[in-house]
Image: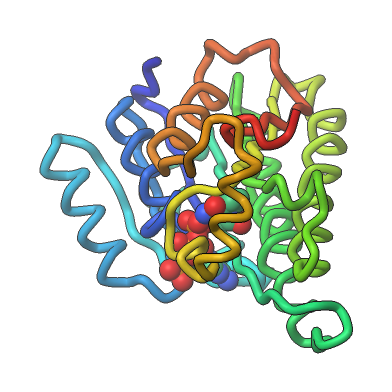
Amino acid sequence: MNLKNKVAIVTGGAQGIGRAISLRLAQAGAKVVVNYNTSEAKANLLVAEIEAMGGEALAVKADVSKFDEAKQLVDAAVTTFNTVHILVNNAGITKDSLLLRMTEDQFDQVIDVNLKGAWNMIKHTSKILLKETDAKIVNIASVSGILGNAGQTNYSASKAGVIGLTKAVAREFAGRKVNCNCVAPGFVSSDMTDLLNDTQKETWLSQIPLGRFGQKEEVAELVLFLVSKESSYITGQTISIDGGLVM
Ligand code: NAP
């Protein structure tokens, strides 16, 4: 899969799954705009790593939950690389708590980053993507948005929202050959899953047919496929990558 001359924005692209995606798209030849919110040092290191392997990358700070900052991120991409062909909405947070204890702020923060952030980025890239040929949007959802997880009413709602957003955008943009799909990871080893305690990890492991957590690089390979021309006839789909947890 070759992304030569393609420009990609990866939100939350400096760390965790986002970092693996940024690196994989760069390895395939894309110019990558690595968005970060707090991980500035990691973003700069990643840009240096991509440049060292002969690629092009740009680190841009933006809180994607803020409409204006999301626009500034897209503007920075266009200023440096002229256009955008690929948008990967990866930025996400958790604020887990049982509903009885969850605060309004915990609910709002998760919706703002995970769902509104994805909408903000699609909104600001839309005119650019619609003018390009064969542009691609991939939104990172979660099995939590399909199954619903106790303790994650905010997160499950945000990720279910991302799946609905994906389908609506896929229908709106299909006429201009912009494909929009979702990737729904199960449990992938990362800072986010490190927050789970051992009992929670054991419980989930016992339900995963492949008997292990996923790797960030495995998610990145799926995203690469979905932003490549090889996936041209796939749109509006949510593809789980979860060791068989959801089937
Ligand atoms: P992570 O290591 O905690 O990384 C989260 C990423 O989101 C970071 O790059 C962070 O950027 C970025 N981010 C958070 N708030 C942001 C904001 N307001 N604006 C811009 N970027 C922001 O988590 P991860 O496991 O890699 O998760 C990546 C995505 O996969 C998320 O959407 C998550 O919901 C989804 N997912 C993960 C799993 C899993 O098992 N790990 C499972 C299902 C779905 P900074 O570090 O710069 O702040």
Closer-to-camera residue (157/201): 201
Residue at point 70%, 42% (across, down): 126
Given residues 189 and 62, the one toward you in this image is 189
Residue at 24% from the left image edge and 63% from the top image edge? 44
Q: Position of 58 compared to 122: left or right?
A: left
| Residue depicted at 80% across the width and 78% down the height | 98
Identify whether 148 is placed above or below 180. below
Q: How many labels does the image show?
A: 0
Q: Horizontal and vertical percent for residue 64?
A: 60, 66
Of the 4 image quadrants, the one containing the C terminus is: top right
Image quadrant where one finds the N terminus: top left
- From what the image shows, is residue 194 above or below residue 247? below
Residue 12: x and y, percent? Answer: 48, 59
Residue nearest the observer in this picture, 131 or 244? 244
Q: In which quarter of the image is residue 24?
A: top left
For residue 60, which quarter of the picture? bottom left
Which residue appears farthest toward the left when viewing the image? 52
> Residue 196, percent across and down?
54, 67
Question: Vertical placement of 99 versus 80: above or below?
Answer: below
